Image (cartoon, grey):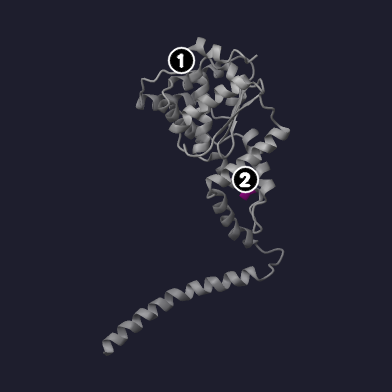
């Protein structure tokens, strides 16, 4: 029985050796959390706890994300944006958006498509399915497929959770993510600022193009419309449209889109009729 006793003793000794470092770490953390650090010491506490806040922001449920989007929407509408009251145009945008949703990366969340009464050529999205399309962009499109390509691109941002990623990064950089938690008003304000004023990363824009093109193809629209609309805006006179000025170089995006279209050809040509499109937006003056 001696050999059995010696074997068990070795096993327990190994486990104790593994356990001791863990106990040491726990004791060190307890000491750190229960001790006031000197003012000139490296502030480790926020560094330890910021990771917790990042995890919380990255793993919010679809319902929480929608509620966050709702709060952002309230702030946007209360001070920054005026929505169009044109029921025909609103209905038309809803129809296009809902046609694209089943072919998106997140078809099961609730989407809200809104028309902004603004002449600038622009579109943006926040969190939880909120998409905004400017009337200036609707007028600039030559056909429904071109308009759908922009809506699909914004849906692509939601599919990739790009704004949430930016919000996490900015929350850490600005120190909003602290031990006390992320203040709801601060995070909402941060999200609104990012959505309206700050550009997406180059990687996010290419990703939204890729996701959007897939939704466009799935809905039966002409894929080339995404390319043609981007090229037309790039060639336009005057200042660069807001839709492109906050994005990476349009020429680079066109090259990437053409490669994707060549790799995934489609016979879909829905939305190419310019006359039908003009009839659909005739109430937009």
Specify the quadrant that holds the C terminus: top right
User: Residue 204, percent across and down?
Assistant: 51, 36
Q: Which residues are magenta?
A: 169-173
Mark 1–mark 2 CB contact (< 8 Å) = no
Residue at 51% across, 74% down = 23
Tell me where residue 218 appears, x and y as whole percent.
41, 28
**Which picture quadrant has residue 16?**
bottom left
Residue positioned 47% across, 76% down in the render: 20
- Relative placement, left or right, of 155 versus 260 is right
Residue 260 is labelled as none
Q: Residue furthest bottom?
A: 2
Residue 179 visible to an observer of this rendering:
yes
Q: Nearer the viewer, residue 250 or 138?
A: 138
Provide residue 87's location: percent of width, then percent of height. Answer: 62, 22
> How busy is the neighbourhood of tag 2: few (under 14 within 10 Å), some, or many (20 plus)?
some
Q: Is residue 89 magenta?
A: no
Label 1 neighbour load within 10 Å: few <14, some 14-19, many 20+: some
Q: The residue tagged with tag 1: helix, strand or loop?
A: loop
For the residues labelled 1 and 2, the Cα–Cα distance comes to 40 Å
For marks 1 and 2, the one nearer the N-term is 2
Residue 208 point in image, percent of width and height: 49, 33
Residue that carries the numbered disc 2 in the rendered image: 170
> Looking at the picture, does residue 53 appear above or below residue 214?
below
Position of 88 with respect to 104 (left or right) is: right
Q: Is residue 82 above or below residue 23?
A: above
Tell me if residue 75 comes above or below residue 25 in the rendering.
Answer: above
Residue plotted at (56% across, 56% down): 51
Q: Secondary structure at mark 2?
A: helix
What predominant SS class does the magenta segment belong to?
A: helix
The correct choice, above or below, for 245 with respect to 159 in the image is above
Residue that label 1 marks: 272
Q: Quadrant of the N terminus?
A: bottom left
């Amino acid at each position: 029985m001696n050999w059995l006793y010696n074997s068990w003793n070795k096993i327990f000794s190994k486990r104790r050796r593994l356990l001791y470092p863990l106990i040491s770490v726990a004791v060190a953390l307890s000491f750190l959390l229960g001790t006031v650090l000197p003012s000139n010491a490296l502030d480790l506490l926020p560094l330890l706890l910021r990771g917790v806040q990042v995890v919380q922001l990255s793993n919010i449920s679809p319902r929480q994300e929608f509620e966050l989007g709702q709060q952002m929407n309230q702030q946007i509408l209360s001070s920054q944006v005026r929505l169009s009251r044109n029921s025909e145009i609103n209905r038309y945008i809803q129809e296009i958006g809902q046609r694209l949703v089943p072919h998106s990366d997140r078809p099961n969340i609730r989407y809200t498509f809104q028309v902004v009464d603004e002449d600038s050529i622009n579109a943006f999205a926040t969190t939880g399915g909120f998409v905004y399309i400017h009337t200036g962009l609707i007028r600039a499109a030559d056909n429904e497929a071109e308009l759908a390509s922009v809506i699909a691109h914004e849906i692509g941002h939601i599919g990739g959770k790009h704004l949430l990623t930016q919000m996490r990064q900015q929350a850490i950089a600005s120190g909003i993510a602290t031990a006390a938690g992320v203040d709801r008003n601060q995070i909402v304000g941060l999200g609104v600022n990012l959505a309206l004023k700050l550009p997406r990363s180059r990687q996010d824009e290419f990703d939204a193009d890729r996701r959007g093109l897939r939704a466009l193809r799935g809905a039966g629209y002409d894929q080339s419309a995404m390319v043609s609309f981007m090229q037309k805006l790039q060639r336009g006179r005057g200042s660069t449209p807001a839709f492109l000025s906050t994005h990476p170089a349009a020429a680079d995006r066109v090259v990437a889109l053409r490669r994707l279209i060549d790799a995934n050809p489609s016979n879909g040509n829905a939305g190419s009729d310019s006359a039908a499109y003009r009839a659909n937006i005739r109430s937009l003056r």
